Amino acid sequence: MISLLDAESRWSEVIEQNHFPDGTLHINMPPNYFDYDTIVWNYENDAELFTLICVKGHFEDLPVTLDMPYIPHARMDRVQKLEDVFTLKYFCKVINDLHFDKVIVQDAHSNVSLALLDRVMDLDPIGEIKETIDRVSYYEKEEPILFFPDEGAMKRYSNDLNLPYAFGIKKRDWSTGKILGLQLMNGELVKDKTVLIVDDICSRGGTFYHAANALKEAGAKNIYLYITHAEHTMVEGNMYNQDVVKKIFTTDSIFKPEWDIRRKVEIVR
């Protein structure tokens, strides 16, 4: 979804997108579009990139910011063989060629994304995580122990949260990329405790499924999950459909409430 935002008043308006009979795009800008200073892109699919190109072009030389909380193609941040196409590189090139005054993202999955984007500002999700901690503390009447599924998440978040934490080391089949299990570090902290798993992104949730099972085996009482970006495929995985995780918290960067058929997700802003 692409919308316009007045950053000062926080008033926003969704850009109307229709199609001609031949399938080509018909975009209707609001008559006062020049009063807005920010284009907000809550990613749904790559076809929206053409809409973004057209909308930015319509602003001509007016100063415009792009607010893009989730960076598409951020997972494709490296190539391992000649046949792999470095899609993140070319996506970022398109964004850079649009010459936004500023590009705002949230909790970028990879530093490669930040290196490839011009004039980028990466917003950390600490406020959203602290709100999640408050909600979990209210539900369980105790502050949770934090758990980070890998050392990268631990280094990214632990210093700003100031709570006891454990972390994991993934066991992976490097030939397929599949996660086979997870080893707990500081696992003794979670026994008989409420645990909040914290990370940046979830597709099918395999990492968190293994993490939750390892935490249960270590004696954790109740397990919650915070991820900044939840893809629609999350609801197809074991982590969502089994009861290893009590509740999932995420932002509205890409997740839509209508996907939550089990009423297991809470949106934090």
Image (spheres, rainbow, N blue to C red):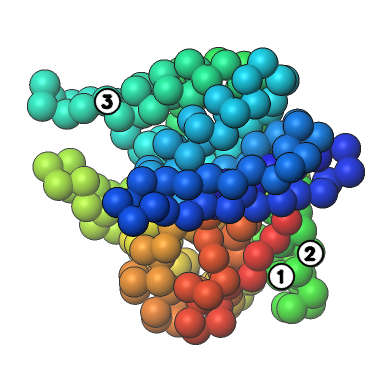
| Residue under the image location 34 percent in, 70 percent down | 237
Q: SS of the residue at dot 2?
A: helix
Q: What kind of residue is marked 1?
A: Val
Q: Does 91 sit left or right of 173 as displayed? A: right
* Label number found at residue 134: 2
Q: Position of residue 191 (x, y in %)?
A: 57, 70
- Circles 1 and 2, Cβ within 8 Å, touching? The answer is yes
Horizontal side, residue 235 vs residue 71: left or right: left
Q: Amino acid at mark 2?
A: Asp
Contact check, label 3 and label 1, Cβ < 8 Å: no
Q: Earlier in the sequence, mark 3 or mark 2?
A: 3
Residue 148 visible in image: no
Q: CA distance from mark 3 to mark 2?
A: 40 Å
| Label 1: which secondary element | helix
**Which residue is more in the foreground, 251 or 35?**
35
Residue position marked by numbered label 1 in the rendering:
136
